[in-house]
Amino acid sequence: MQLSFLVLLPLLAACSPCPSSLAPVSVAELFFGRGLPDGGFVPPSAWDEFLADVVTPAFPDGLTVEDSAGQWRNADGQVIREPSKHLMLVLPGTDAAGAAHRAAPLAQAWRQRHGQDSVLLLVREACAAF
């Protein structure tokens, strides 16, 4: 009896339905720091170029970008504050693993272009309507 209950737990978790007016989606959020390793900041024109050349071709159906302020602690224990860009991607028909897989190249491209240590990637399941 316990075995059948344990087998059903993953099925029950996967079946939590969205309200009838909403559909299941995955949401990927990336936080791109704009601080440069040698000081200064990635200029707005470089962000616009990255958005046009890298992000939009990968996600042409739509996205949201917001200015944000980031803070993190480096390896030396110093708190670093920097302006950031918050990118939100709502991905219908994609599970969390697929959303992470699709978003990861954006983080890699940003790190390579601007010498960043990291880009924060958050992925979650949600319900949405368009």
Image (cartoon, rainbow, N blue to C red):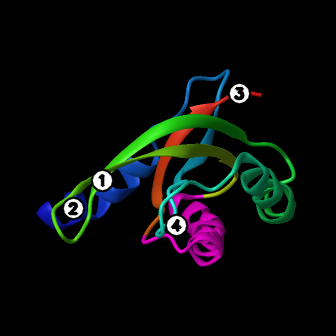
Residue 97, label in figure: 4
Q: List the residue tagged with mark 1.
A: 72
User: Relative to 87, is 63 on the left or the right?
Assistant: right
Q: Position of residue 122 (x, y in %)?
A: 45, 53
The crowding category of the residue bearing disc 3, from other C-alpha atoms within 10 Å (few below 14, some 14 to 19, many at least 20), is few
Answer above or below: position of 69 versus 82.
above
The crowding category of the residue bearing disc 1, from other C-alpha atoms within 10 Å (few below 14, some 14 to 19, many at least 20), is few
Identify the amino acid type marked 3: Ala
- Looking at the image, tell me whether mark 1 or mark 3 is earlier in sequence order: 1
Residue 87, label in figure: none
The range drawn in magenta is 95-117
The residue at 72%/46% (across/down) is: 44
Main secondary structure of the magenta stretch: helix
Identify the amino acid type marked 1: Trp
Q: Is residue 84 magenta?
A: no
Mark 4: secondary structure? helix
